Image: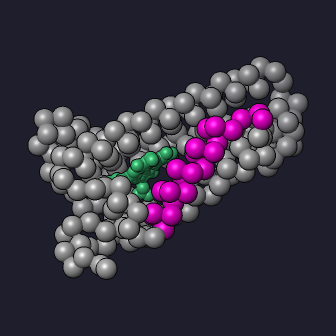
Amino acid sequence: MKNPDEIKVWDPLVRLFHWGLVVTFAICYITEEEFMDLHVWSGYAILVLLAVRIIWGFIGTEHARFSDFIYRPSKVWEYTREVLYCRARRYIGHNPAGGAMIVLFFVALLLTTISGIMLYGADEQAGPMATIMSGSGELVEDLLEEVHEFFANFTLLLVFIHVGGVLFESLLHRENLIRAMINGRKKA
Ligand code: HEM
């Protein structure tokens, strides 16, 4: 039963993107050489999810749009300080700190997946960059491996901060943000 006091905030594409990203990132992180095919295909899936979400950020529903949640750095900083003092106001869509986190996620995930595809081409002569990357030498391979690993771990660090922030905000405003990302609805 729908609660009449609630409004629709996250459209189905945003929710599918989010939980799809959670699953594919988890698969990528726990699989490596042992399950290379699964690792690679989950990485491609992340790239497709990102591409669709970036397009949706321009043409999607109100709170899915970048214009709804990208704020200038001074606003992000001001909001983060307000959160630390437990006096941040509630936002229906993403708050300024959440918006900045989304940008960081997108950049980190793009750098992780792109370096992964380059490494796969150089190391295994496979994937869409096999022709360009094959024969690129050990130095390039080592560098790509470092970059790929660094951004994968950086993304994991962002996930911890993100989940911590979600739980903190849920307590601060006494609303279940995780439930909202599942059913798309929030108290009006
Ligand atoms: C089980 C762990 C996770 C939980 C409980 C969780 C929860 C949430 C919630 C509640 C939101 C909405 C925040 C708001 O109200 O503004 C959100 C947004 C978001 N989360 Fe997570 N998250 C999790 C894992 C992840 C992971 C692993 C990633 C990336 C690898 C991620 C990336 C994002 C992104 C990009 C958004 C913005 C969604 C959009 O607007 O399209 N999350 N998350």
Q: Nearer the viewer, residue 141 or 174?
A: 174
Q: Assign the N terminus to one quadrant of the image.
A: bottom left
Q: Quadrant of residue 179?
A: bottom left
Q: Quadrant of residue 69?
A: bottom left
* Residue 1 located left or right of residue 15: left
Placement of 71 over or under 60, stated as above or below: above
Q: Assign the C terminus to one quadrant of the image.
A: bottom left
Task: Find residue 73 and report its horizontal and vertical position in percent.
Answer: 28, 40
Magenta stretch secondary structure, dominant: helix
Q: Residue at x 85, y 36 (%)?
A: 124
Magenta span of residues: 13-34
Task: Find residue 87 and report its horizontal and vertical position in percent.
Answer: 11, 43
Placement of 92 over or under 27, stated as above or below: below
Q: Residue at x 31, y 68 (%)?
A: 185
Task: Find residue 64 and report its horizontal and vertical position in percent.
Answer: 39, 64
* Residue 188 located left or right of residue 165: left
Q: Residue furthest front?
A: 1
Report if residue 181 lies within the magenta region: no
